[in-house]
Amino acid sequence: MNKKAKRRAFFICLAICLMNLSLAIKITERFNIKRISDQVHHEASGLSIVAAKTQEGKQNDLIEEKKGEIKEVQAVEVKKSIEAKDIKVSLKNEDNEIEPMFFITVLIVCHMIKNKVLDRDVLIPSSNNTWKKPFQILKDKDREGIKNISNMIGKGVLTRFLKKEDIIYKEGLDAEALISGIGYVVSKDRLIGIFNKNVDESWYGLFPYMVDKFVIVKAEKGFEFSEAKSSGILDKRDTINDVQWIMPDLKNLPIRDAIEQLNAKTAKIKVLGSGFVIDQSPKPREIVKGDGECIIYGRMNN
């Protein structure tokens, strides 16, 4: 072996020996770059390992933060759910809240007439081809007449009245539902307060006013809610149905005047034709019992 080859072999062997020696005394760790995170407490053992652990800690922090946000959102949703259930229970509590039905109709009509939005003496198309004044429509709870009143007043005016009186209703309800008190609820105390404010003595002839199982009566200190049976209202109605009266002679009267005369006696008035009365049923001076039906015939339109 020549000198050049021997020298090369010598350096190779020396390099191998130095490598083994460095491994034996862990010289690489003495010169390795190390970094310790200020936020995450790790024992530094090497750059790559500490960096990995620091990244893992940040991910854990993000996960914990997201969990906290999720818990907050869930807490809010649970609270809303509880509040919604409480509202539903409140709406179903018949001791405090009722669907106002025709009670609110009385209030609205009285308010509109008081504020000259509606004329007290106007004749309004009602059920069975009849024409009635607002008072008679309220007395009869005539749905067709109430519907026509709502059209005359308009939804905008109705909603302004309800908002003014702090009555909450669904936005999708039409004018007929709003004036008929359908699809929303009002506390009894609130209704009585509005009655005392809007209904004057000119309307006392409507009372006691019964709707379903409830009745509003006029007492000394104002209006009150009561149960229909306990108020004896059913007995009063039977008495009214037994009252007899004599049919007036309506011939040659204008249809409007004939309706006004009959309105004082009965709510069941049917009009056929227009112009002047040429015939009637029952006939003049016949005895009519209670709220009997009357038909007046006018000259038929050509």
Image (spheres, rainbow, N blue to C red):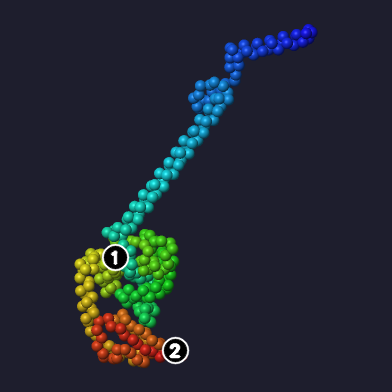
Q: Residues within 10 Å of mark 1 (few under 14, many from 20)?
A: some
Which numbered circle lies on residue 106?
none
* Quarter occupied by residue 35: top right
Q: Which residue is mark 2?
A: 301
Can residue 74 be seen here? Answer: yes
Q: Residues within 10 Å of mark 2 (few under 14, many from 20)?
A: few
Query: Sequence order check: which comes first, mark 2 or mark 1?
Result: 1
Which amino acid, by three-letter code, is at mark 1?
A: Asn
Residue 206 percent across, percent down from the top left: 28, 73
* 1 displayed left or right of 201: right
Residue 66 percent across, percent down from the top left: 48, 39
Q: Nearer the viewer, residue 83 or 43?
A: 43
Residue 243 percent across, percent down from the top left: 22, 82
Outermost residue, front side:
1
Residue ID at (36%, 61%) = 167
* 156 displayed left or right of 279: right
Can residue 111 be seen here? Answer: no
Q: Nearer the viewer, residue 100 or 49?
A: 49
Rounded to the nearest angstrom, the CA distance separating label 2 from label 1 is 46 Å
Residue ID at (43%, 70%) = 154
Residue ID at (39%, 49%) = 80
Q: Is residue 276 above or below residue 200?
A: below
Q: Quadrant of the N terminus?
A: top right
Residue ID at (30%, 58%) = 93
Q: Secondary structure at mark 2?
A: loop
* Quarter occupied by residue 72: top left
* Quarter occupied by residue 119: bottom left
Q: Which residue is mark 1?
A: 196
Residue 29 percent across, percent down from the top left: 58, 17
Which amino acid, by three-letter code, is at mark 2?
A: Asn
